[in-house]
Image (spheres, grey):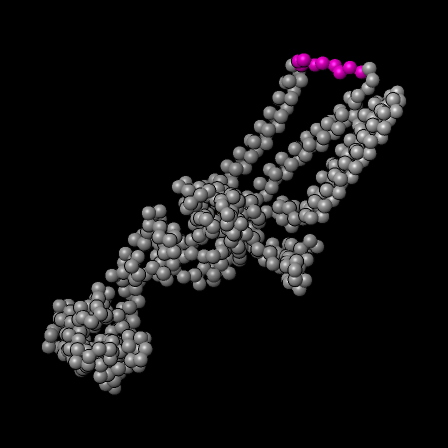
Amino acid sequence: MTTLLITGIILLLLAIIVLLSILNDSANALKSGEKGALDRKYTRIGQFLMVFNIGFLVYCFWSAYHYKNYMMGYGPHTAASEHGPSIDNLFNITLIVTGIIFVLTTFALFWFSYKYRHHEGRVASTLSHNTKLEIIWTAVPALVLTVLVVKGIVAWNNITADVDPQEQYLEIDVTGQQFLWNIRYPGKDGRLGAKDFRLIKPGVNELGQDWRDKHNIDDFMSDEIVIPKGQKVKFRIYAKDVLHSFFLPHFRVKMDAVPGLPTYFVVTPTTTTEEYRQRLSHYPEYQVPSDPEDPDSEPLWKAFNYELACAELCGIGHYSMRRVVRVVEPEEFEAWYNKQKSYYLENIRFTEDDPYKDELLPFEVEERKADFENRFNKAYNSVEEAGRIIELRHVNFKTGSAELTPLSRYELDFAAEAMQAHPEIKIEVGGHTDNVGNPENNQHLSEARANAVKTYLTKKGVAADRMAAVGYGQEKPIATNDSAEGRQKNRRTELKIIK
Ligand SMILES: [Cu+2]
């Protein structure tokens, strides 16, 4: 690019010097009062302009040819999406038509200034009106533009045709904000959860996802856009603050992200990132080091990545709105997809912002139930006394009290069911505390907690005489009391099976 600019500047400087020297000569000739000096001056200027015209056109075409392998649509940069070639085709048709007109008008411009240069005694003719000319220069451009616009509309309608709901497609939600893109994928259910801008909470719920919608539970956020080759992808495009523009140059995708007006774009990638790199590797332009400062850095083709850019000047940090886009084989996509973690379960679950913080979701109930039954059966079948103890991992109390937390009910329900399934057994409910505070208080607390569990199980239909509630206070720690983690382990409720 620098070479191009420098060459251009040198050519212009040369032109100015030549022009000045001609003017200087002519001025000298004029001063001498020589006859025909003015005619000669304009002839030379006219000739010079013709030469300049040819030089200028050659320079235009040469630079376009010289840099073609850097330009979208040429060299290695054929479109990486299914609809891409139709856009490239439109661009080429427009380029050819406007290119021809450009060359013709440039020639006409310079030729006229030569042909109709000043000539002693020649008078300009006046053309006040010519209907034929008017018709020609109105009708021809109108016709050409109509053809171009209609072709464009047809291509655009094909490209933006909506996806058939029956069709297999991947939906990705992209939301622009100053100055980043939020990228959200639907989880295993394949559906994006509902959003409401009133639920947006910076740093917690950037998109305003409604956690009460079950489709949100498995949605995940990603720092990059990863899409499988050959898969139809529908990008749902949003903006949170100002206008942004969702631009995937290699896929010929560009769509404004408008606050309050969701837009979308459907695209099917046809070339993986790796395939595109291989394509680039055949061109000498991409053999240079990717980091110009470091000659040992990997070649440009190897460092290539597709990118998402913001194509709307949206503020001071506009330049930083870049995300890497990776197109991979379907198997690799599957592997990546399975590794992603739900945003809700990782960041929201059981926090203040979770509308379900006091209840378990169906799959969590399943998991905990399976875990409890597994441990219960192990204890039930154990021959040793120590092995017959089942720790209640999810039974907790409010700090310093014997009041059960709402989430404790699930494990206690499993315990009640197990007791009913095995009417022959009796149990001892054991309460334990850590060593914080007064040992006597801890003793009382542990008894109260064991009793609370017994009471709960009685309410669930387990006969009271099958259960003994015992408080052990801080006497039987299972971990160190010197760390918070250890103390948490020590504060526990256990069930011991007595046959
Ligand atoms: Cu932007």
Looking at the picture, how far across and down is residue 255, in whole percent?
49, 42
Name the image quarter holding residue 279: bottom right
Q: Which residues are magenta?
A: 122-130
Which image quarter holds the C terminus? bottom left
Looking at the picture, how far across and down is residue 107, in whole percent?
74, 29
Q: Is residue 450 visible?
A: no
Seen at 44% across and 52% down, the residue is 182
Seen at 29% across and 59% down, the residue is 352
Seen at 76% across and 40% down, the residue is 13
User: Is 232 or 98 nearer to us in this picture?
Assistant: 98
Name the image quarter holding residue 483: bottom left
Q: Is residue 106 visible?
A: yes
Q: Is residue 124 magenta?
A: yes
Q: Is residue 497 left or right of residue 141?
A: left
Figure check: 158 above or below 299: above
Name the image quarter holding residue 388: bottom left
Q: Is residue 384 magenta?
A: no
User: Is 104 or 333 nearer to us in this picture?
Assistant: 104
Assign the magenta stretch its main secondary structure.
loop
| Callout count | 0
Seen at 58% across and 40% down, the residue is 87
Q: Residue furthest bottom?
A: 384
User: Is 131 or 465 nearer to us in this picture?
Assistant: 131
Looking at the picture, how far across and down is residue 129, in whole percent?
66, 13
Looking at the picture, how far across and down is residue 436, in whole percent?
24, 78
Q: Residue furthest front?
A: 31
Figure check: 339 above or below 36: below
Q: Is residue 258 left or right of residue 349?
A: right
